[in-house]
Image (cartoon, helix red, strand yellow):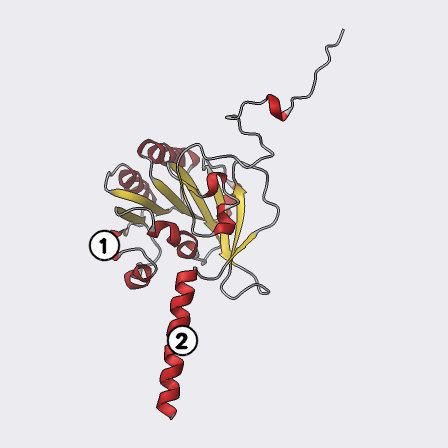
Amino acid sequence: MSASVSPLRRVDVHSDVWQADALAGAAARVLATGDATLDAQLPGGGWPLGALIEVLQPVGVHSEWRLLLPALARSGTGAVVLVGAPQQPFGPALGAQGLACRRLLWVDEQAPAQRLWATEQALRCADVDAVLAWLVQVRPEQLRRLQIAAAEFDKLLFVLRPEAAQAESSPAALRLWAAPAPPGHNDGALEVRALKRRGPPLVQPLHLAARPACLARLLAATEMENALDRTAAHA
């Protein structure tokens, strides 16, 4: 004798239970990304604090500042630690977009084991608000240690990796791919794909505006001032 099984209705499920066909709510605090289009596609509406966030990029592409800077500028007043950044950050440019130079701490370490150690120690430091770590060679269990440290100390953690890592397993709560958008979109636009999130698959990539509004206004004002100077010089 077979028992009939009635389908589970959405109304029967407790509100705290995430259903895979819906975008999950925030289990903890989040920080708005600075782009409403991206916020709308992230569980809770922003970058999760106390969680590992992975950003994968093609070789030679470095769009991390375009993607992360608006949130980093509003992440607090503590240190923003950069572990293994491929290039020395240009403080004045970051400062012009709201990230004070005095908050930046650059750890120039090449050895993978030392980068991991520095990242974990930074997460455990009370004076640190956010950590960005460029990790090319890292195992899933090592990422899990960083995830645990970020959760324990409620820190904002971004791990930057090459896009080839997409084939590897990861404990990241959120995993994105980012690169400049192909021709046909606004100049300088950023294409973002959600590789892993608590919610339904994101079928179409997102195309984020080329520049934050405040920076666009600043550049427009500068270009106008330069045009007026050129006009006066030829008068």
Q: Quadrant of the C terminus?
A: bottom left
Is residue 151 depicted above or below 216 in this figure?
A: above
Q: Outermost residue, front direction? A: 11
Q: Quadrant of the N terminus?
A: top right
Q: As shown in the figure, which amino acid type bears the numbered disc 2?
A: Glu
Provide the residue designation for mark 1: 102
Cα–Cα span, label 1 and label 2 = 28 Å
Q: As shown in the figure, which amino acid type bears the numbered disc 1?
A: Arg
Q: Residues within 10 Å of mark 1 (few under 14, many from 20)?
A: few
Percent x, y of residue 229: 35, 84
Q: Is residue 182 visible?
A: yes
Give the camera-side residue of 11 and 145: 11
Mark 2 element type: helix
Q: Residue at x 33, y 35 (%)?
A: 154
Q: Is residue 177 visible?
A: no
Q: Residues within 10 Å of mark 2 (few under 14, many from 20)?
A: few
Provide the residue designation for mark 2: 223
Percent x, y of residue 101: 26, 57
Is residue 219 depicted above or below 171 in this figure?
A: below
**Earlier-in-chain disc, 1 versus 2:** 1
In this view, the mark in front (1 or 2):
2
Q: Residue at x 75, y 9 (%)?
A: 2
Q: Residue at x 37, y 78 (%)?
A: 225
Are the residues flagged by discs 1 and 2 in contact, CB closer than 8 Å? no
Mark 1 element type: helix
Give the camera-side residue of 177 and 66: 66
Is residue 204 depicted above or below 52 in this figure?
A: below
Percent x, y of residue 12: 60, 21
